[in-house]
Structure formats: C-alpha cells, structure tokens
Image (tube, helix red, strand yellow):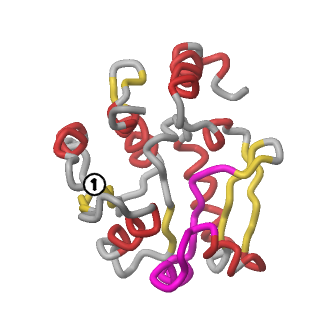
Amino acid sequence: MGRPKQLLPLGDRPAIVRCLESIREAMIDDVVVVVGTNADDIVAAIDAFPVAIARNEDPGSDMSQSLRVGLAEVSPVTSGVFVCLADQPMVRSETLIRMCLCHLEKPGMIIIPVFQGEKGHPPLLPKEIIAEIDVVPTLRDLIERHSGKVYHLEMTDKGIVLDMDTWEDYQGMIERFSSPATMDN
C-alpha cells in the first residue's frame, strides 16, 4: 500500500494502536510486537503499551520468520499464542476473551475464529504446536499438519475477517469504523 499499514489512521489512532487496545482490553498481558528493520515510527506509536518489541532483521522474510522471532520473546509459562495481525484492527476484545476461555476449555486445540462460515484471524495456538513453526514453512502448513486439533469457534465479530490489504479495504474499514451500526455486519 506504499506505506506501513500499521500506521494508517482509524479515527484518531493508528491501526496498530487499535489492535493493541483490543488485546489489552482482553487482559492479555504477554504481548510481543514483531517489527521490521525500519520500524522506528511503529515503535514510537506504541510506546505507551507494555509490550516486548522483537525485530525481524530479515526484510525479505515471510510471516513465519516473524513468528519465529516473536516466539523467542514469549513467556515460558504462556500456554497459548494468538497470531494477531496489525492490518486487522477491527477484532473486538470480546472475541479475544471468548477465544481465551475456549483455550482454557480445550488447551490442546488450535482455535480458529469463524464469522458466518468464513475462517478469520487471529488464530490461537497451543504453545507446543506453534513452537513447531521452526520446522514447518508457514502457519497454514502448521495448522494443516494439526488439522485434527483444529476447533472452529463461531463468532459474531466481522472484524475477524476484515483486513487492509488494499486501499479499497482500508476505505471500507474507515467507513465501518465511523459507523458503529455496521461494526457487526
């Protein structure tokens, strides 16, 4: 999109701040933000949040490498790991809370949120499964490898399937954000 999606404004705050607000409202304390090598503006935008910053020093790498970098900073006592994407800032804190409760009930399961039959983000993976990202090429491959341990959790939060991959997506998100009546549709 020609500029960091994480810093695109939604209302009076950048997208990444919106993501972190939902995470904090869900009372998730062990948060690692993975940034690239030229991410000083992103780090500055989130300096008020108590998060660990992990830098992916390989500018040509994929999301799996960012996961590997981030996992190195996750607390050893963490039982599950969300893979939250900064270009999906409309995920509600209630969704994350419900997924955490599901993780407590089904600790060995990969929890995938679903909105009206469409799989969304963020997935919540048991730490022992996501640790296998070291030997599996992508997150998708990892989830397929453990397909018998996938639990689809139906949600009413359309934010789990909305992302900002294009300017049109971003414009649609701005419209949704400025009209709370459309947030769940």
Q: Quadrant of residue 5?
A: top left
- Left or right position of 77 against 150: left
- Left or right position of 26 against 37: right
Q: Looking at the image, is 56 positioned above or below residue 142?
A: above
**Residue depicted at x 43% and y 48%:** 23
Return the residue nearer the eye: 42 or 49: 42
Quadrant of image for the C terminus? top right
**Residue depicted at x 67% and y 20%:** 182
Return the residue nearer the eye: 66 or 62: 62
- Furthest residue toward right: 117
Q: What stretch of residues is rendered in magenta?
A: 120-140
Q: Where is residue 103 shown, x and y percent of the image?
A: 62, 68
Q: Looking at the image, is 58 positioned above or below residue 107?
A: above
Q: Where is residue 97 shown, x and y percent of the image?
A: 56, 52
Q: Amino acid at mark 1?
A: Gly
Q: Assign a secondary structure to mark 1.
A: loop
Magenta-span inclusion, residue 139: yes
Q: Quadrant of residue 115?
A: top right
- Left or right position of 18 against 111: left
Q: Looking at the image, is 179 positioned above or below residue 113?
A: above
Quadrant of image for the N terminus? top left
Magenta-span inclusion, residue 39: no
- Furthest residue toward front: 60
**Residue depicted at x 34% and y 37%:** 4
Counting labels gives: 1
Q: Where is residue 144 shown, x and y percent of the image?
A: 70, 74
**Residue depicted at x 68% and y 36%:** 158
Q: Which residue is tagged 1? A: 36
